[in-house]
Amino acid sequence: MGMAAVPAITMLPRVSFAQAPATSAVNTTGLAVTDTEVTVGILHSATGTMAISETGSIEAEKLAIEQINAAGGVLGRKIKFIQEDGASDWPTFAEKAKKLLVNDKVAAIMGCWTSASRKAVLPVVEQYNGMLYYPTFYEGLEQSKNVIYTGQEATQQILAGLNWIAKEKGAKTFFFIGSDYIWPRTSNKIARKHVENVLKGKVVGEEYYALGSTQFNSVINKIKLTKPDVIFTDVVGGSNVAFYKQLKAAGIDLAKQPLLTISVTEDEIDGIGGENIAGAYACMKYFQSLDNPNNKAFVPAFKKMWGEKTVIGDVTQAAYLGPWLWKLTVEKAGSFDVDKIAAASPGVEFKGAPEGYVRIHENHHLWSKTRVGRAKLDGQFELIYETADLVEPDPFPKGYQ
Amino acid sequence: MFGDYSIGDLGSIFVMQGFAGLILFSVYVLMALGLAIIFGQMGVINMAHGEFMILGAYVTWMTSNLFQAYMPSLFGGYFFLAMILAFIASGALGMLVEWVLIRHLYKRPLDTLLATWGLSLMLQQAYRSVFGAREVGVELPQWMLGSLHVTDSIEVPINGVFVMGLTVLITVSVAYVLYLSRWGRQVRAVVQNRIMAGAVGINTEKVDRYTFGLGCGIAGVAGSAFTMIGSTGPTSGQLYIVDTFLVVVFGGAASLLGTIASAFSISQTQSTLEFFMSGSMAKVLTLLAVVGILMLRPQGLFALKVRK
């Protein structure tokens, strides 16, 4: 009875599914909706390099769909999903998105992970008027009628964390290190503007390493030379593991040297090893250890479905929001039509979110809190700080471009 | 950029940076040795080299789990056993692959590229199915973590010293086996002229199989050692393959000394440049230099003098 353990969700107002509205009324554009079922698509990489990250998202989306079905479905219809594999290859993502929209006529797609895959799918969902729920925290600078961004955009994630560490640790000098692609570069650009213009601090180094790079000894020496108050990192993928192992081996003690990362979730710590990263601060909107009733129901339900050993990171939680937000929006709009859903999305709130509470903004991003956690030896984060209010999403931040 | 720092600071940074270059050098040699044997001696372009390394890493991970569960008191020493097991596992898989796949392709060296690339995809998916798509964390014994305090500002990472020691050991053994042992002479004879070698009574099939196995086994040991500095996941092997080929090709395919010289020059160039500019720019400049030199000297730094 994993489903009964979701008290906050069952308290939500719900249309009675005994008298489901007629299909002709709720589906005027020929989507895959019958009197008893509605089909959605799941589009992630189950194979290839990105499978390591996207597996968690697939698991979360399936869990959400199962829970929604157990609670009566959407407008009286059970959700059926078609899963396609993007295979870590961006053209494949676009092709499969087209297949889902054109052949399968899915009512919504939960999918994509990297910005590259989203950029590949975006023209497809816009052309064929689909609805994409995208879970990853990303660099911002994008907004579409056809996409709901359930992760945080860069300013939401970064600014609160920088403010906190500047205040708490009296940090004045920062050293940035990231993987060399669009997300870290954009994030660091925003962070640099914030450090220089708002916090009146100084960036003493900004370094990028090619994706997959495994040697960080040189940059670690530069860190030792410049002695920054804070190391700010957005290194991703396999490089992450190498970076933290070498940092530790070089004698940098994260208990004494503050390090703020925006790219390490519980998922990554699995590979890095808790002992290599303990003491580091991560800036996210969700940690598996969050202490609230929604999360206390969510974590056991997730583990029951996917195994005791699985960990839940920020993106996994954001992926879980996708199907729920879609269901709530459909019920608000009283229709599966994409145009009506796009129009009804702003203002939709999800009180059962494991992160607490989220609401969709006019710009199709989510209002959410930003949190700072400290990595512990066991691979979990301990919540240190959270913003008092929801942070407004601002994908086109003025003064930060 | 040095205006703000004291002489003492700069001195210790140069020492540590020199050390970073040496560690990079050892890592490159360790990655490339297995390939230098397979590509250099046998002419087989083994695109699955990285996957053989990762097999070694997974063996290390399993050994560490085994020790934690059953022999926690001996955990400090598990790494040595893990490296031996990694050698055996990767070597055995290598011999199997040679028997099933490679031996049919000796006359078509370019096709080995395609065949082993396919093999690398298959191995990646196999790891993903067996060990899961997520990376695994290999726990190291306490004594291998941290660093040695030389002075207040100079710290030398222990795992770096370990990798350097291991590299020296393996390089010396390989050099001995290839150049001084009877078996090594057979290997080189087969490489130079397969038909003649067979005619004088060398079992060329057996030599081929063991050579390939040895190369893969060394890749396994390298993978095992790299659990200290890198990630262990189904596709982690891909992180190493480009650098590995770079080192072997630049050094001159058939020469062990060339591999070492090339690893040294690439690693030193890269780590020096990394210090003065950003990591990605350093990589670009290093690659440009290598391409430039290879245009002038296509056979690589050291080439065997053979009569054409």
Image: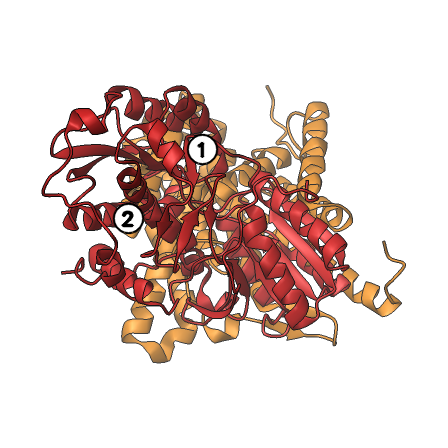
- The chain drawn in red is A
Residue in the image at 62% along x and 68% along y: A258
Q: Residue A286's quadrant in the figure?
A: bottom left
Please, what is the three-letter code of the amino acid marked with disc 1? Ser
Disc 2/disc 1 C-alpha distance (Å): 19 Å
Res A139 seen here? yes
Give the answer, above or below, for where B185 lies relative to A6: above
Please provide percent x and percent y for residue B130: 26, 49
Question: Can you name the residue that lies furthest to the right here?
Answer: B3
Q: In which quarter of the image is the N terminus of chain A?
A: bottom left
Give the answer, above or below, for where B224 lies relative to B70: above
Residue in the image at 66% along x and 51% along y: A191
Please provide percent x and percent y for residue A96: 33, 26
Please provide percent x and percent y for residue B63: 33, 64
Disc 1 secondary structure class: helix
Q: Mark 2 points at which residue?
A: A59
Towards the viewer: B82 or B254: B82
Picture colour for chain B: orange
Question: Between disc 2 and disc 1, whose residue precedes?
Answer: 2
Res B194 seen here? no
Mark seen at residue A117: 1
